[in-house]
Amino acid sequence: MLGSLAPRTSFIFPESYQKFVNFEKNKKNSFRNNACDEIPLQNVRYCWKSGDSPAEWAIIGDSHAKQLATGLGKLTSAPIIILGNPGDPPLLGVKNPRTFKLETSEEIPSSNIIHWIAKSPSIKFVILSARWERFSSQFRYSFDNKPVRSGHLNIFGKQLVKTIQLLKNSGKEVFVLLDNPHLPFDIEDCFSLRPIETNKPSTCSFPASEGNETVDLYNKVVTKVTSQLNVPLINPSSVFCEDGVCKAEMNGRLLYEDRDHLSDFGASEVAKKIIEDINSTRKEETLLPLKPSPSEG
């Protein structure tokens, strides 16, 4: 009887059940819309544009960049385009050979995207975002179509510098986003659907340093490069962490959909941070204007 009632009522473990429902709704597999049909780029899986106007903003990156696009699209009226591929950081010359099984091809999709954006007359602003630490030695990448077997951190830093310089020299204003903290546990551990649970109580908080050593290492390189090149850096950690403790939920809603990807809710919270930080770089103009709320519109 309890089992049959649980999915239909809220009196049995309501908070956990609602988290589960929201968690399942947030999962997505594809990210593309028709606006990208006009773009002459091959081998681009993430291609989404907000609105009908030519894009003024471009987000380049992997799935960690993709997850932010709709959040920004919902909050700002600025025309945005997201371009990228799974597992491919937005770095010149760098490729994940497994993304399109291009081991024998000289094509480097990330370089093609960066050069296309550099030449695009409508795009004025570029946000670089990625799971930066994926370039570490535990993952398989190539640089200039040669396997990277050592010196990952050095190559990463140099190519990030070259990417930013190319975009700036083409007249684009560049912003770089640090990666969000990664969970040291599965997000499913934050809730339970069982009214009687014999395991230890789950938790949705964790020390900021736990499981994020490599993330922090690459974030430090990103911080150093952006400081040297005088490029604004956006750090989303304040959305998740305070006083050395990070959380995977906020106001009863999950911020993550797995160990490192954000839920729609989490992405929207980070999008708010991005808009706030970018707009604070200007006194005379608002770069990312907010959409009017339904009550205002």
Image (tube, rainbow, N blue to C red):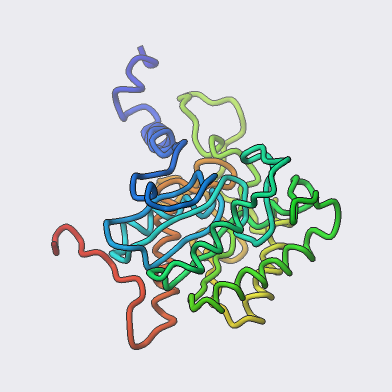
The answer to whether residue 15 is above or below residue 283 is above
| Residue 72 visible in image | yes
Quarter occupied by the C terminus: bottom left
**Quarter of image, res 76:** bottom left
Q: Which residue is drawn at 61% across and 33% down?
A: 200
Residue 276 location in percent, x, y? 40, 72
Seen from the viewer's position, the closer of residues 24 and 32 is 32
Return the residue found at the far bottom.
Answer: 284
Q: Nearer the viewer, residue 90 or 178?
A: 90
| Residue 178 placement (x, y as % from top left) | 58, 64
User: Which residue occupies 32% across, 18% down?
Assistant: 5
> Relative to the observer, which residue lies in front, 163 or 86?
163
Q: Give the tally of numbered discs.
A: 0
The answer to whether residue 237 is seen in the rendering is: no
- Residue 56, how many percent across, how many down? 37, 68
Q: Quadrant of the N terminus?
A: top left
Instruction: Where is residue 143? Give x, y as percent.
Output: 75, 55
